[in-house]
Every structure is written in C-alpha cells, then in structure tokens.
Amino acid sequence: MIVGLGLDVVELSRIERTLGRFGEAFSRRILTPAERDWREGRLSVPTLAGCFAAKEAAVKALGTGFSGGIGFQCLEILPDALGRPVLRLSGPARDRASEIGADAFHMSITHGRDTAAAVVVAERLFPEPLSPPSCSGCPSAGSGASGSPQAGPDPSLWRAPAERVFPDPAGKRRHPARRKRRA
C-alpha cells in the first residue's frame, strides 16, 4: 500500500550557481560521507542535482519536508549491485517512516540538459488486514443476502489489466493479445 509519494524537479543552473557560490560546503551539506566517498571526486552538477531532487522527493513522500530534525544527512542514496538508487534513512527520517508505516521506498532519478527530477514512493509492504464494512441495513459481515458467505470479487480481476481475459462477441473467452484484427 502506498503511504507517501514525493516528486521534485530542480534546474541544473540553480544547483550550478549554488555550487559556484558555496563550493564544497554545499555538496558536504547535501551528501553524506558515504555518498561523497562513493563518488570519489566525480561529482558533476547533474549528479548533485539528481541527489538533491531525490532527497527533496523523499521528504515529500514522508510528508514532512525538511522539518522536525530531518535534514539532508538523514537521507542517503547509494546504488545497489545493479546501479539502482536505494534510499537509506537514519535518525528522525527513519522515525517518521515508522510513524507512517513505510517499510520500503522506490525511487527513480533522471536528468536532462536543463533539469534533474526524482520521484519517491513510500510503501507499506505488510498492510494491516482490511475489516469488512458494516452497516445497519446490511446482512452480517462476511455474508451475502442469503446468509451464506460471499464469494468475493472474481479472481480474474486480480491480474494485471494486460493479463485479463475478455469475452469476444462470439462468446468465447480470449486473451486481448490473441484477438483477431478485422480489416
């Protein structure tokens, strides 16, 4: 279940101006020691802008922004074995993730000629079980109108839309990719 979503877009020129004005102090403020070590001095403006956008998107997904003690150093973004960015939280950021029930984060970072952008999705992998709805005019929870247990939704609807099977006009069930095209 998605419990948070963050998106940020930053202009490369803004990061370049700030880096020119404050130099290494700016990158030390944004990057953790592990992030700086991983980059080994190969820090480019697009890379720093992507990291900046990713951390901004992460705090938006947490629903706090940079407040309540959450700062850039509480968020660390390093690649996994495949090069995919992985978000690691510490301190108040980790506490906030626990509060909202986020136990997984998905992230994508990109940059073009003029901008860098990132999106972060905070997810609860193990959601609490849903309780059946109750209302005064309904039969008892978990029962149909006849008092027998409800069958629930059609399991074929649980599949991804591309995998659903749809009836064709002739009444046969066909997979969408196997439909015959008409001239």
Image (spheres, helix red, strand yellow):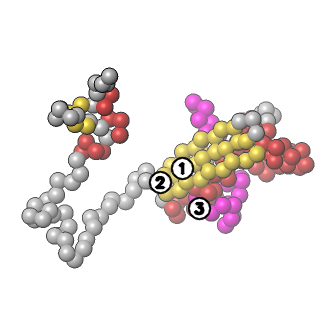
Residue 16, picture quadrant = top right
Q: Tell me, yes or no, if residue 33 can be seen here.
A: no
Q: Tell me, yes or no, if residue 71 can be seen here.
A: yes
Residue 82, picture quadrant = top right
Residue 114 placed where, x, y %? 76, 39
Q: Residue at x 16, y 70 (%)?
A: 139
Q: Residue at x 71, y 58 (%)?
A: 71
| Amino acid type for the residue under numbered disc 1 | Val
Kindly identify which residue carries mark 3: 63
Decide if residue 7 is on the left or right side of residue 28: left
Q: Residue at x 19, y 71 (%)?
A: 138
- Quarter that holds the C terminus: top left
Element at label 1 = strand
- Marked residue nearer the N-terminal end (2 or 3): 2
Mark-to-mark CA distance, 2 and 3: 13 Å
Tag shown at residue 2:
2
Residue 31 placed where, x, y %? 74, 46
Residue 72 placed where, x, y %? 71, 53
Kindly identify which residue carries mark 1: 121
- Binning the other alpha carbons within 10 Å of mark 2 as few (below 14), some (14 to 19) or many (20 upward) gives some
Element at label 2 = strand
Question: Compared with residue 89, is residue 39 higher up or lower down, i.e. above or below?
Answer: above
| Amino acid type for the residue under numbered disc 3 | Gly
Residue 182 placed where, x, y %? 30, 25
Q: Are marks 1 and 2 in contact (CB under 8 Å)?
A: yes
Mark-to-mark CA distance, 1 and 2: 7 Å
Mark-to-mark CA distance, 3 and 1: 11 Å
Magenta stretch bounds: 62-86
Question: Compared with residue 68, is residue 155 higher up or lower down, i.e. above or below?
Answer: above
Decide if residue 152 is on the left or right side of residue 18: left
Q: Are marks 3 and 1 in contact (CB under 8 Å)?
A: no
- Marked residue nearer the N-terminal end (3 or 1): 3
